[in-house]
RNA sequence: GGCCCCGUCGUCUAGCGGCCUAGGACGCCGCCCUCUCAAGGCGGUAACGCCGGUUCAAAUCCGGUCGGGGCUACCA
């Protein structure tokens, strides 16, 4: 049997980190098993679905590198992989289910249902609706024929129970008195999630349903539906949910949840993938850094953790730094150049790109997020503004002015401009002034870069050039005296 | 309320009856390196929710309890 799995987001929001992880696990499982990874759009909720979200989900998956083999924009044996385009099929199935007595037209009013549920809760009984208010099939058919609006509900067989072997959770059993006679077709004729999703899983030949734990208690409904369609049930695997730092379900209030936000903040897809993979799965040994190929080799759905995981940005950020440091320097420049240009409000000429490439390795090794690079290198390409705190902390110190003045002189005397020459000159200056490097170089850093935090000084000065460096030292000196 | 799921350092996890005086990673702290900030090196901090039981032996098995989460819609 070839494995067929799917990722089936509904385009009612941006692709979020939890969805990304679900997609990743599906992808890893499919790749490891030589199976097919399908992308489907569960967009039966027209009101909440938007084009923007549809596009964002595809973008996000592609950015992460989770290429799918079949489905949206990839095609495949099915005519459509969007539920909004398969409405007829769901209606047909619903009609068949009514005909075979596995489902029925329901006329129960919201008020009736409300009251029933309230009462059941008050008495500590199951609040699952059991069809007690419905007319007999003949009357129901007549009322529908007369044009009375009705929903279609699945007739859950009671007494009974459904139990299944969840790959990550083990045996799970639900008593049917806890399972609602759920609506499969709304009174406007559109299918609910349960129907559409199950029909698709059956029609698409999905062998393994790997999804979030929020759907665990819906699974008996899906199994019942599958069997009513006389199809073979899939194997289910329910992944624990992702939580915010406060242990509550991850939501907007915990900061960024959208994959897109991480992309914009300067995270690398490799790092996000690596981090997500480890949120609920471990390769078994003590490896923390693992590339996708390694994950595919070693991924095992049955060893996925049952515990909900807290999404902790600290570790992701550290990991991102690791991946950034591992990048070839040229790739780093390419990745960072657009951001620098945007920061500057203009594009870089060839000489400036060369300058950027020159200090890139130095910046690269101290970068955790791509977005922190532009402000750090901008001083090489544009006039600086002094950071107030840095100025106050450094430039008002005793000896600061002397160091700045000394540096201007010594740098002016350098014959052959190079990093080594700059260092030699500045160290000589220090010696002359009998000043420590710590004390003597900080004022220069502020004068040159505008901040007390910058890339290494000699390299920065060398890259900036003699003329501009001396000019900046002069300007700072004026402001100091 | 009912049903279902889950419970090892602050966080992600390893552990599947003796190898555990519980391992790794992030974070945090200290030291070293050092022109700032990082990076790097070294060291440290810190956990089996609780109570019973099974067993010669339990983080590992069982029961209970407490805590967290999910579902309980004509949302998905």
Image (cartoon, rainbow, N blue to C red):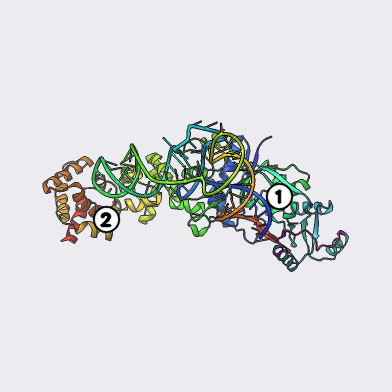
Determine the residue positioned at 53% across, 53% down. A243
Circle 1 residue: A174
Q: What residue span does the magenta drawing correspond to?
A: A122-137
Q: Which chain is mark 2 on?
A: A
Q: Are marks 1 and 2 in contact (CB under 8 Å)?
A: no
**Residue A55 left/right relative to A107:** left
Q: Secondary structure at mark 2?
A: loop
Q: Is residue B22 above or below residue A185?
A: above
Do the residues marked 1 and 2 share a common chain? Answer: yes
Determine the residue positioned at 19% across, 61% down. A479
Determine the residue positioned at 18% across, 50% down. A440
Mark 1: few, some, or many residues within 10 Å (few <14, many ≥20)?
some
Query: Considering the image in quadrants, where does the N terminus of chain A appear?
Result: top right
Residue A231 at x, y = what percent?
76, 43
Q: Taking the image as drawn, is residue A153 in sight?
A: yes
Circle 2 residue: A450
Q: Could you say which is closer to the camera, residue A363 or residue B37?
A: B37
Query: Considering the image in quadrants, where does the C terminus of chain A appear?
Result: bottom left
Q: Secondary structure at mark 1?
A: strand
Determine the residue positioned at 49% across, 56% down. A246
Q: Is residue A266 above or below residue A283?
A: below
Mark found first going from the N terminus, 1 or 2:
1
**How far separated are the C-alphas under marks 1 and 2?**
66 Å
Q: Residue furthest left?
A: A432
Q: Residue furthest bottom?
A: A111
- Dominant SS type (magenta): loop
Q: Could you say which is closer to the camera, residue A146 or residue A182?
A: A182
Mark number displayed over residue A11: none
């Amino acid at each position: 049997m070839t494995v067929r799995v799917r990722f089936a987001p509904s385009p009612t929001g941006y692709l979020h980190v939890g969805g990304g992880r679900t997609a990743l696990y599906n992808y890893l499982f499919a790749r490891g098993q030589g199976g097919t990874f399908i992308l489907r759009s569960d967009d039966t909720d027209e009101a909440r679905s938007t084009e923007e979200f549809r596009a964002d989900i595809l973008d996000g998956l592609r950015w992460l590198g989770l290429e799918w083999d079949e489905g949206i924009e990839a095609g495949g044996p099915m005519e459509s992989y969007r539920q909004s385009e398969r409405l007829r099929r769901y209606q047909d199935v619903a009609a068949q289910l009514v005909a075979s007595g596995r489902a029925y037209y329901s006329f129960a009013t919201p008020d009736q249902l409300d009251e029933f549920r309230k009462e059941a809760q008050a008495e500590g009984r199951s609040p699952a609706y059991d069809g007690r208010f419905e007319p007999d099939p003949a009357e129901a058919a007549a009322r529908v024929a007369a044009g009375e609006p009705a929903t279609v509900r699945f007739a859950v067989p009671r007494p009974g129970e459904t139990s299944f072997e969840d790959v990550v959770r083990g045996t799970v059993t639900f008593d049917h008195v806890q399972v609602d006679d759920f609506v499969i077709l709304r009174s406007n004729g559109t299918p609910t999630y349960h129907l559409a999703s199950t029909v698709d899983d059956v029609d698409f030949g999905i062998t393994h349903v790997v999804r979030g734990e929020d759907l665990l208690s819906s699974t008996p409904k899906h199994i019942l539906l599958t069997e009513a369609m006389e199809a073979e049930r899939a194997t289910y695997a329910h992944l624990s949910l992702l939580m915010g730092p406060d242990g509550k379900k991850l939501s907007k209030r915990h900061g960024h949840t959208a994959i897109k936000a991480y992309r914009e903040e300067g995270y690398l897809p490799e790092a996000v993938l690596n981090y997500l993979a480890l949120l609920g799965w471990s390769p078994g040994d003590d490896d923390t850094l693992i590339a996708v190929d390694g994950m595919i080799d070693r991924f095992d759905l049955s060893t996925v953790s049952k515990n909900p995981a807290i999404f902790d940005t600290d570790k992701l950020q550290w990991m991102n730094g690791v991946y950034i440091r591992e990048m070839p320097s040229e790739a780093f420049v390419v990745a960072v150049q657009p951001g620098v240009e945007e920061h500057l409000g203009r594009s870089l000429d060839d000489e400036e790109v060369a300058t950027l490439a020159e200090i890139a390795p130095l910046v690269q090794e101290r970068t955790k997020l791509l977005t922190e690079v532009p402000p750090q290198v901008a001083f090489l390409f544009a006039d600086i503004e002094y950071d107030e705190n840095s100025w106050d902390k450094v430039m008002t110190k005793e000896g600061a002015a002397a160091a700045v003045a000394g540096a201007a002189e010594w740098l002016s005397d350098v014959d052959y401009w190079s990093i080594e020459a700059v260092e030699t000159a500045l160290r000589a200056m220090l010696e002359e002034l009998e000043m420590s490097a710590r004390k003597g170089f900080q004022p220069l850093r502020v004068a040159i870069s505008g901040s007390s935090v910058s890339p290494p000084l000699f390299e920065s000065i060398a890259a900036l050039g003699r003329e501009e460096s001396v000019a900046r030292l002069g300007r700072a000196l004026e402001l100091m005296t």
